[in-house]
Image (tube, helix red, strand yellow):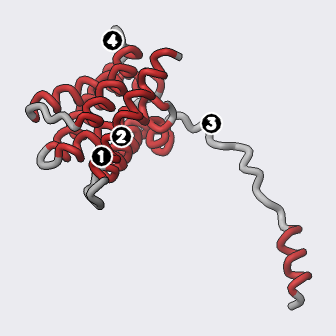
Amino acid sequence: MNPIILLASVLLLPAPAFAHVGDGLHHGLMAGVLHPFSGADHLLAMVMVGLWAGLQGGRARLALPAGFLAGMAGGALLGFAGLALPGVETGIIASVIVLGALAALALQPPLAIGVALAAGFGLLHGHAHGTEMAAGAAFFGMLAGTAALHAAGLALASPVAPWARRAAQAVGGAAALGGVILALV
């Protein structure tokens, strides 16, 4: 077949418009997966949990993200139930700053304290998400999306080169600075 005719035929085929981006699907699994990616504050905090956990190593690599996810699940359930928590937005911004600083300084508190801190911040993030979305598949998607962000942070902290630890700490510092900027905006 003549390549020009083939090219012309392909160019004349109808193309999907992608005009409907799924805005009406607020309650599905994918809506939940994408929800943690929808705001810089949530995205930064969740990546910082993984980064901080990765920089600590050992049991913290699993315990800190698990604590955050448990707190997030509880907070979302409170949000679904319509129970108010004071200072949620302030606490979320504080979580970005604190988690970024903890990663930047590679601080290693006792594991129980780190898990409690992660769970407390997870509670706030979960409550914020729980008040914005419906329970159901979106809930499980939200937890999966959050776990993916934790995994991204863990990957950033993986020791692939001698300078990787310092680079990961610099990312934590940048996130803390980003949290300060978010607080001022």
- Element under label 2? helix
What's the amino acid at mark 3? Asp
The residue identified by callout 2 is: 170
- The amino acid beneath tag 2 is Ala
Of labels 4 and 2, earlier in sequence is 4
The quadrant where residue 56 appears: top left
Residue marked by disc 1 = 166
Image spot of residue 104 (x, y percent): 29, 35
Q: Secondary structure at mark 4?
A: loop
Q: Which residue is mark 3?
A: 23
Question: How far separated are the C-alphas under marks 4 and 1?
Answer: 37 Å
Regarding residue 179, the answer to whether it shows in the image is: yes
Where does the image place residue 158, in percent across and percent down from the top left? 27, 55
Label 2 vs label 3: CA separation?
A: 36 Å
Amino acid of disc 4: Leu
Say which of 31 and 40 sits in front. Answer: 40
Q: Quadrant of residue 137?
A: top left
For discs 4 and 2, the disc positioned in front in the rendered view: 2
Q: Is residue 110 left or right of residue 155?
A: left
Q: What residue sits right under mark 4 in the picture?
A: 85
User: Is disc 3 placed on a helix, strand or loop?
Assistant: loop
Indicate which label's residue lies in the foreground, 4 or 1.
1
Mark 2 and mark 1: span between their CA atoms? 6 Å
Q: Please tell me how crowded label 3 is: few (under 14), some (14-19), or many (20+) other residues with Cα within 10 Å.
A: few
**Horizontal and vertical percent for residue 90?**
38, 14
Front-lying residue, 183 or 171: 171
Nearest-to-viewer mark from 3 and 1: 1
Is residue 19 shown left or right of residue 112? right
Residue 122, above or below 150:
above
Q: Is there a contact, CB below 8 Å, between mark 2 and mark 1?
A: yes
* Pointer 2 with pointer 3, Cβ within 8 A: no
For the point 24% across and 23% down, the residue is 120
